[in-house]
Amino acid sequence: MRIIINNNSMIPIYEQIVSCIKDEILTGTLSAGEGLPSVRGMAADLKISSLTVKKAYDLLEEEGLVTTVHGKGTFVNETDHQLALEARKKAVEDELAAVLDKARHAGLSEEEIRGIIEILLEE
């Protein structure tokens, strides 16, 4: 598993870890039953606090993506890929809605916004 942390990001480190692991689960890089690194091991590899990794694992467990077995480790759960795809679409919709709101508050017309989107889609 490859997790890259950006220390200059405004996104908390535990959220970056969650995002990386979630992406690997949803893309199938991590499969059901596969074990995640130990909390201490990942903390040592990333040179961060064990509490930060624990918080990330707890959030993944709350979302039903992993299960922690005391004394054995944290393992990837079976995921419904269609449900996971819908969740990702919803997250993108939410982000786009926020960007549209920001563009409208900046005084851009719908035509200008569409033009920007078309340019970005062409890239």
Image: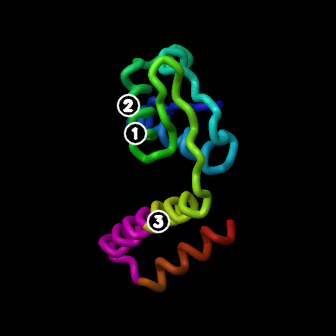
Q: Residue furthest bottom?
A: 111
Residue displayed at 35% across by 67% down: 102
Q: Quadrant of residue 105?
A: bottom left
Q: Give me the C-alpha separation between circle 1 and circle 3.
A: 18 Å
Q: Are marks 1 and 2 in contact (CB under 8 Å)?
A: yes
Q: Give me the C-alpha separation between circle 3 and circle 2.
A: 24 Å
Q: Amino acid at mark 3?
A: Lys
Alpha-carbon neighbours of circle 2 within 10 Å: few (<14), some, or many (≥20)? some
The reply to whether residue 46 is visible in this rendering is no
Task: Kindly identify which residue carries mark 1.
Answer: 59
Instruction: Work out whether 71 lies above or below 17.
Output: above
For the N terminus, the quadrant is top right
**Mark linked to residue 55:** 2
Q: Amino acid at mark 2?
A: Lys
Q: 1 and 84: which one is in front?
A: 84
Residue displayed at 41% across by 18% down: 50
The reply to whether residue 18 is visible in this rendering is yes
In percent of width and height, residue 80 lies at 58, 57
- Nearest to viewer (mark 1 / mark 3): 1
Q: Which residues are magenta?
A: 94-109
Alpha-carbon neighbours of circle 1 within 10 Å: few (<14), some, or many (≥20)? some
Alpha-carbon neighbours of circle 3 within 10 Å: few (<14), some, or many (≥20)? few
Residue displayed at 39% across by 26% down: 52
Left or right of 102? Residue 96 is: right
98 in the magenta segment: yes
Element assignment for label 3? helix
Q: Give me the C-alpha separation between circle 1 and circle 2.
A: 6 Å
